[in-house]
Image: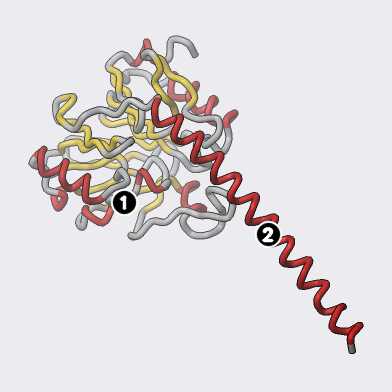
Amino acid sequence: MKFKTLFMKKPLKIILIALGIITGLIVILASVYLIYFTSMKKEMKITESGEIVSGIYAVKDSYVNMYIIRTGSGYIAIDAAIDKARVKTELDKLQIDPAQVLAIFLTHTDADHVGSIELFKNARVYISKDEEQFVNGKTSRFLVFGNRLPCKYELLDDNAVIYFDSLHVKAITTHGHTSGSMSYLVNGKYLFTGDCLSLKSGKADIFSTFINMDNIADKASIKKLKTISGAGYIFTAHHGYSNNFKEVFSNW
């Protein structure tokens, strides 16, 4: 009986040790992530809320911008920031009613890009077909953690075009930051890139080698965006915007 009890305790001990090691690794990785992310935030350049180009509004959250674009009968949005209360406050300052937002185009589904979606009760939500894997549980975004999207959504293929009154929005797959990241070209002139790239001294650079899922794919996506003909402005989620498209990609 004593031998049997010891035999039963041994597997339990092994399981507890394994769980302890796994927990320790998660804590270490989370700590490294927090330290890196804190450092990365210091390099971010967030645009203040306001109309930055005729008909295009930046909405400033704590460390991320979303964008609102006026159409003939309302607005569309690129991403949805992270803090619902703060976004509502900023929209009130801009005198923009969330109920008038007809659509939200998500560059990807990380938490800092979807946080205020529930404000926009009348908006259709679009994501890349390749991004769905992170919200339906098929693929983890970070370790064992997936992303959450608290609404119905529609899927977009590469080069899909959606029309809203005087606007047309072209979807462009730009994998790298996530395996389903997407950029959006509005009216052939205004490019919204989410976290595909950063702007440093007015030039495009990779967003984050630590947070990106695939840095090689991200570099390929930046080169892909460079080839867009006719674009004039480029808007990022964390590094402001530029009205000199050619200069942004001059080092690529």
**Image spot of residue 180 (x, y percent):** 49, 43
Q: Amino acid at mark 1?
A: Val
Choose top left, top right, bottom left or bottom right for residue 17: bottom right
Give 25 or 176, whichever is nearer the viewer: 25
Report the quarter where the N terminus lies.
Answer: bottom right
What residue did someone put label 2 on? 20
Choose top left, top right, bottom left or bottom right for residue 193: top left
Residue extending farthest to the left is 95
- Dot 2: what SS? helix
**Image spot of residue 101 (x, y percent):** 18, 47
132, above or below 234, in the image: below
176, above or below 148, in the image: above
Residue 234 as seen in the image, left or right of residue 100: right
Q: Disc 2 to disc 1, how far (Cα)?
A: 41 Å
- Dot 1: what SS? strand
What residue did someone put label 1 on? 125
Q: Tag 1 or tag 2, which sits nearer the N-term?
A: 2
